[in-house]
Image: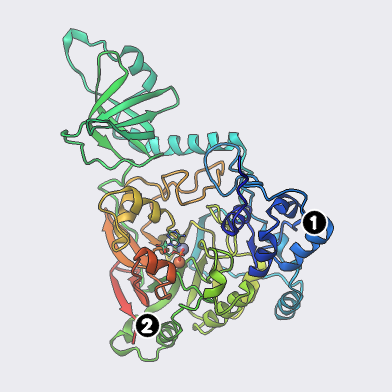
Amino acid sequence: MPIVPMTEKDIVRTLAARGYMIEPGALQLLAGRADLIDRLLESLDPSALVVTSADVQRLLAAAGPAAKPARAGAAPDAGDPGPGPAAAVKAAPAPSRAAGATAPGGPGRDTAAARQDGGREKASPEKARDVQVISDITDNSTCIGDYDEFVGFFRNRYARLGEMIRGRLSARPVESVRKNGGRRTNGEKNEISLIGMVGDVRTTANGHRIAELEDQTGSISVLFQKDGDLKDAALLLDEVIGVTGLPTGDGGLFIPSAIAYPDVPYTNAARRSGERSVAALISDIHIGSDTFLEDGWLRFIDWVNGDHADGDGDLVGRLRYIVVAGDVVDGIGIYPGQEKELTITDVYDQYRKAAEYLGMVPKHIRIIVAPGNHDAVRQAEPQPALTREVQAMFRQANVTFVGNPATVEIEGVRVLVYHGRSIDDLVSSLPGVSYAKPDAAMVELLKRRHLSPIYGGRVMIAPEARDHFVIDPLPDIIHSGHVHTVGVSRYRGVLLANSGTWQGQTEFQKRMNIQPDPCRIPLVDLGTGDVKIVKFTG
Ligand code: D5M
Ligand code: FE
Ligand code: ZN
């Protein structure tokens, strides 16, 4: 059997899954010696963010010439987040360990960081009086990727989402239906309900869909007939649903007449601030990318400072919060060949630039920053906040750092910030959901009360003991980004907003025909819930 060498992409993925980025030079060095990747991982300082050329050179010097060809998937298959023990995910380096730690390699960078941050000094991001972090994985990650953790993670999801449905349906255990499914009293057909997780969906030769529905007692096939009322019911893998209907004679198959999602109660009412404060929702700044739209961004910064406010003077006067839903910088080693599309090739320099920009925001405005898939934290979600080393760069700005996802309460209004990577999964799985209307995808997530239902899709999920993607308690606002388009919807009192980007169309997006909608952002009046979209293009 031919041995397939690990591609640069595989190496980047493998390292990313373990929480590391890699410098382009280091990647080149390692490309011919992927057989060394296990040893590299062992040799790295767990608090390091970036694998540098110096790290690889040290390893090469110690290892000598290649003894055997590079192996495909030599490292712990971490590029493939399939279920099971192979999908090991390292918990992110605890920020406290990273505080003041010397980053490996890159001597210039270390000393610059040390100078700027006063060496060992710890960042103490002060909490604004009005901003409370309600939930956040930062410093609470327990996961190491064991099989048991996957079991616990899904149990936690099933229990919490199932409970939401149970409030409206009285459901039976699946196993009891399988055993007694065919038995009817007086020949009557009494409908019953089941609550389970969708384990598999397949389409039969005749065009019907069969979903496997699992609960803790067993699994049953649920038939969605091609001409039935539920023919268009949206089904996502790993989501928790309730079905009401009839079992067939032997109990092996269930024919539903209704489907129930965890959903939001009709009675849900959004909380409002007592003041008419305004929050600007932004994301996907991508500082360091050659498609970062600096002109538009600086127009925003001017606007925040009261320049060129035109008819928006009133809004700017009330602007007290800026919420950033990830992809602050473009990062490095995020996709193969990225280095050719960067104007700032050192991730720390990218964050220094970000700190400079956010430092230009007036001090009475509180900025809340969550990471995205381009930021320098572990790729597996939930992601912790930016490390203290990076946070320390933002001392000029008034920033609260949170993880992804995280819920913050601003003047009594609950804002759930989630970068939005799962929107990619929904676009490819749900008919009618597109990049042009990201808020429609967010409505689907809210109905499912889950930010990332599909396991094993584009989102690499760390199986924490608690499923941090369950949307509970209900927020008043869900703010996402990632897909680089703007969209705002409301669903049963909850405001759903995607905040676009400050990056123009990338080469990759050109190839994929993804049209970004840059330099436009939603501004939310926290007193009324009203939204205005303001644009900062020429
Ligand atoms: O993602 C920006 C947008 O581009 C988002 O809609 C996903 C899409 N994108 C980016 N990279 C990829 C890959 N590798 N495959 C498919 N789609 C992608 P951002 O997180 O800003 O890069
Ligand atoms: Fe982005
Ligand atoms: Zn993103």
Tell me the residue that label 1 is attached to: 65
Give the mark count. Answer: 2
Q: How is the image coloured?
A: rainbow
User: Mark 2 falls on what kind of element?
Assistant: helix
In the rendered image, the vertical position of residue 171 relative to residue 476, given as above or below = above
* Residue 41 seen in the current view: no
Specify the label residue 35 is tagged with: none
* Residue 251 seen in the current view: yes
For residue 517, side relative to residue 24 (left or right): left
Mark 1: amino acid: Pro
Q: Nearer the viewer, residue 225 or 376?
A: 225
Measuring from the top left, give residue 503's x and y in whole percent. 43, 75
Image quarter (top left, top right, bottom left or bottom right) of the N terminus: top right
**Furthest-front residue in this view:** 2
In the rendered image, the vertical position of residue 37 relative to residue 499, given as above or below = above
User: Mark 1 falls on what kind of element?
Assistant: loop
Q: Earlier in the sequence, mark 1 or mark 2?
A: 1
Measuring from the top left, give residue 244's x and y in whole percent. 25, 29
Q: Nearer the viewer, residue 178 or 99?
A: 178
Tell me the residue that label 2 is attached to: 316
Is label 1 or label 2 in front? 1
Q: Nearer the viewer, residue 237 or 168?
A: 237
Q: CA distance from mark 1 to mark 2?
A: 62 Å
Q: Nearer the viewer, residue 342 or 130?
A: 342
For residue 189, side relative to residue 152 (left or right): left
Mark 2: amino acid: Val
Measuring from the top left, give residue 429's x and y in whole percent. 34, 48
Image quarter (top left, top right, bottom left or bottom right) of the C terminus: bottom left
Residue at (29, 15) in percent of width and height: 181
Residue at (34, 54) in percent of width and height: 427
Residue at (45, 77) in percent of width and height: 291
